[in-house]
Every structure is written in structure tokens, then in C-alpha cells.
Image (cartoon, rainbow, N blue to C red):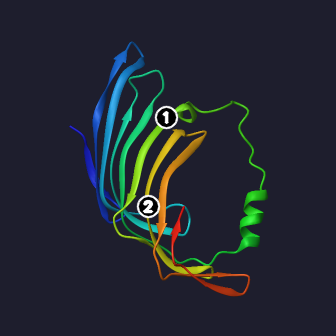
Amino acid sequence: QGLTGSANGGQVAVDGGVVLAGTSIGAGEFYLQASAVAIEYPRGLRSEVDALLTYNISGATPTLSGDVRVQRSAFTDAISLAALARANAAVVVRPATGPSALDAMRLNVSVTTVDDVRVDNNYGRFEGGAQLRVVGTVAQPGMSGRVTLREGGTLFAAGRRFTLTRGTI
């Protein structure tokens, strides 16, 4: 009949099923609906999201598709370039067993901001909206879409202040 519950202040429902072929999963589909769930991903970006996602295991490779709507979001943590450089210099050790079964999972997830993302830290004070699509696989994800920075924001770089008049990524 499905599962319902709460997660980080919001509501979550999971439903679906699988078809067994002997001891293996032959096909199946699971649905996840989330409403007003608080998340912090990536680290420092705090958001409240609504989502409707489908995990399909009926084809040759599993697929995760659906929509995520970011209701409100803020990034207020200070950024340290030295800490970012150290984190990116860390060596990632992969297990000798090879890639996991999830690495091949195909992605097709739309991510849209309802209210603008607010950035207020040592590198700027600005707001922006986004319409993005996460594609590819879990092992090699990609992203397409648009991020629009709102006029009037401020960026801080090289000891100077810059006022945003227009910004699209």
C-alpha cells in the first residue's frame, strides 16, 4: 500500500512495486513524493523542496526521473578558497570491486526554483533563479539549463565590489 512519513519537517510518500522473475527483479517502478522537506545539499545550501520522482527498473538500466521544485533556498556559509582547494586535492579511493549497480542509473530530473536562491556570504549578496535538468548517469552526471542572477546584487572579488546589472549562466 506504500509508505508515508515525515522527513526534516516535511511529508514523504513512497509507493510502487516490483515483478519478480525467480529470485531476480524483472521489472518495477517506485514513486517518491516529498512536500516541504528541508535538505542541505550541496553542503551549505539549505533548501526546502517539493519533489515527485520515479525510479524505474523496467528497462535495461534503471532510470530516475521527475521534478524537484525548490521552494526557498539560501547559501550563507562563508567560502574559503584554500579549503575548497584542499578538498579537491583529496585522493578518492574506489573499491576494488568496481562500479556499483547504481553508477549506471540514468538521470532525467528537472530542478526549478520557485523563489530565488539567496546568497549572502563573503563572496556576494545576490539572488537568482534556476531552471535546470540533471541528465547522464549517477557515475557521470551532467546538467543543462539556465541560472539567472537578479539585478542589484553585489559580488566581492579581489578586494572590490561589483554590482550585478545582468547575469545568466
Q: Quadrant of the C terminus?
A: bottom right
Residue at the image position 72 percent from the left and 87 percent from the top: 159
Most foreground residue, 152 or 92: 152
Q: In the rendered structure, which amino acid carries the disc numbered 2?
A: Ala
Most foreground residue, 23 or 44: 44
Residue farthest front in this picture: 165
Element type at mark 2: strand
Of circles 1 and 2, which is in front?
2
Residue at the image position 73 percent from the left and 70 percent from the top: 83
Task: Return the residue at label 2.
Answer: 130
Place residue 140 in its image quadrant.
top right
Q: CA distance from mark 1 to mark 2?
A: 22 Å
Residue 77 vertical placement versus 47 (above, below): below
Q: In the rendered structure, which amino acid carries the disc numbered 1?
A: Arg
Q: How busy is the neighbourhood of tag 1: few (under 14 within 10 Å), some, or many (20 plus)?
A: many
Which badge, 1 or 2, is on the more N-terminal residue? 1
Residue at the image position 78 percent from the left and 51 percent from the top: 91
Most foreground residue, 65 or 29: 65
Residue 9, percent from left and from top: 32, 66
Residue at the image position 77 percent from the left and 64 percent from the top: 86
Residue 158 vertical placement versus 48 (above, below): below
Task: Return the residue at label 1.
Answer: 106
Q: Is residue 119 left or right of residue 19?
A: right
Q: Is residue 67 left or right of residue 164?
A: left
Q: Is residue 50 left or right of residue 61?
A: left
Q: Quadrant of the N terminus?
A: top left
Residue 49, percent from left and from top: 36, 60
Residue farthest left in this picture: 1
